[in-house]
Amino acid sequence: MMDGRVGAIRSALDAEGFNDVSIMSYTAKYASSFYGPFREALDSNPRFGDKKTYQMNPANYREALLETAADEAEGADILLVKPGLPYLDIIRLLRDNSALPIAAYQVSGE
């Protein structure tokens, strides 16, 4: 997720009395060509450019650790890795460094 987003969501939920609503953060979302078939099926391919500007570099596992710490500090309840299958090493890394539940998201091309 974008920096600060989890904190903003947590603050808004808490302010409205939704203290028990959990937040699942896109802690590690990687650029992947696996998304192609999914986007084609929904006719949701980007009309211009790509979405890599907010997706992580797969070669930089340290970024996942930084995002984990930030998301935890902002109030995330679950950490999400997407796509999951090719990043089992990242899932394990997050598991070893966080007590929060780890989720993995698979898309159609996987």
Image (tube, rainbow, N blue to C red):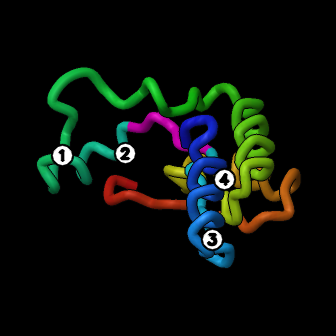
Helix, strand or loop: magenta stretch: loop
Residue 71 seen in the figure: yes
Residue bearing the label numbered 2: 34
Q: Which residue occupies 15% across, 55% down?
A: 41
Which of labels 2 and 1 is toward the front?
1
Task: Give the x, y percent position of residue 73.
Answer: 80, 48
Residue picked out by circle 1: 44
Contact between labelled residues 3 and 4, with CB atoms less than 8 Å apart = no
Which residue matches tag 4? 88
Measure the C-alpha gap from mark 4 to mark 2.
15 Å
Depth check, mark 1 against mark 3: the one in front is 3
Magenta highlight on residue 62: no
Question: Are dots 4 and 2 in contact, CB under 8 Å?
Answer: no
Whichever of labels 1 and 3 marks the residue nearer the N terminus, that label is 3
Q: Amino acid at mark 2?
A: Phe
Q: Is 35 drawn above or below residue 21 in the view shown?
A: above
Expressed as whole percent of the image width and height from the top left, the position of residue 82 reads 52, 51
